Amino acid sequence: MSSETKKDPLFTGTLAKGIRILRAFDEQNVRLSLAELVQRTGLEKSAVQRLAHTLHREGMLNKDPVTRRFSPSHAWLELAYAYYWSDPLIARALPRLIGLSRTIGETVNLAQMSGDHIIYSLRLPNQRTHFAASIVGRRLPAIATAAGRVMLSTWPEAEADRAIDLWPIAPMTPKTVTDRDQIRADVRLAAQNGYAMTRNQMILNEVSIAAPVHGVAGPAEAAVQVSLSAHSYDETRIQEEILPALLDTANGILA
């Protein structure tokens, strides 16, 4: 717990610990034992046992009667449903993303900034899209993605530089760029071009191109992103067939 949190009289530590339990689950950890929850949260076993039991009783976690492992419940979908209704950007973006998907016939996503990661809040896959790339809610290190870099390109330069220096990055493929100076140069180029493009960063032989969704004021907090096969698209085809439609779509969404 940070010193700032300790000074906050409204902060409820028990609730925060319960949220840590929920955040222990991700795409690699969908079913966790009590011991694994202890390891992933760093909380004491007795606290994890009480919190996990309470979350199970309140319908937030399922518990397998045989293995006694916990997993997310349908209640998480209800929360996601409430989020979709609460964010007006989703309602504005969805029809335009559907139009873009029909025009280019490729995978189209809406990404939003979530701390030092991006999160995909809308995903319209095509027939080649694999399962993980079709599920909303996936989070990726922002500076490793075209969407994250193009959003950073709209930030004040000093703030963008600070993010590039400090935000996490991990090699998702053998060709993932981890050189922060190279990433900085890519962000600068995106600021000039109005879009960002990456290759082989998340998936080998994937080209990702993204354009920012600008708000009334301030930096972009969302981006429209298109995923393409490097085997099917060269630079000329991307510039002629994809980029104009992508820019038109992103410019038509007011964040």
Image (tube, rainbow, N blue to C red):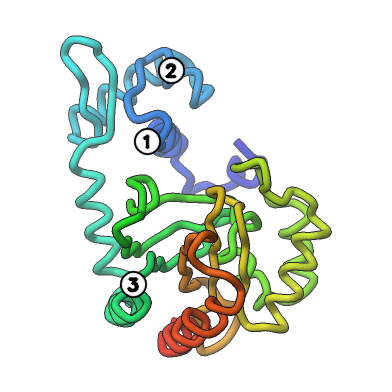
Q: Secondary structure at mark 1?
A: helix
Q: Nearer the viewer, mark 2 or mark 3?
A: 3
Residue type, numbered disc 3: Gly
The residue labelled by disc 2 is: 36
For label 1, the residue is 22
Do tag 3 and tag 1 residues touch (Cβ < 8 Å)?
no
* Residue matched to label 3: 105
Q: Which badge, 1 or 2, comes first in the chain's sequence? A: 1
Q: CA distance from mark 3 to mark 1?
A: 36 Å
**Would you place residue 194 above or below residue 107 in this image?**
below
**Label 1, label 2: how far apart the Cα atoms are:** 13 Å
Asked if the residue under mark 2 is in contact with the one under mark 1, i.e. CB atoms within 8 Å, the reply is no
**Is label 3 or label 1 in front?**
3
Residue 139, percent from left and from top = 48, 50
Question: At 24% from the left edge and 11% from the top edge, which residue is drawn?
Answer: 67
Q: Earlier in the sequence, mark 3 or mark 1?
A: 1
Q: Residue at x 22, y 28 (%)?
A: 56
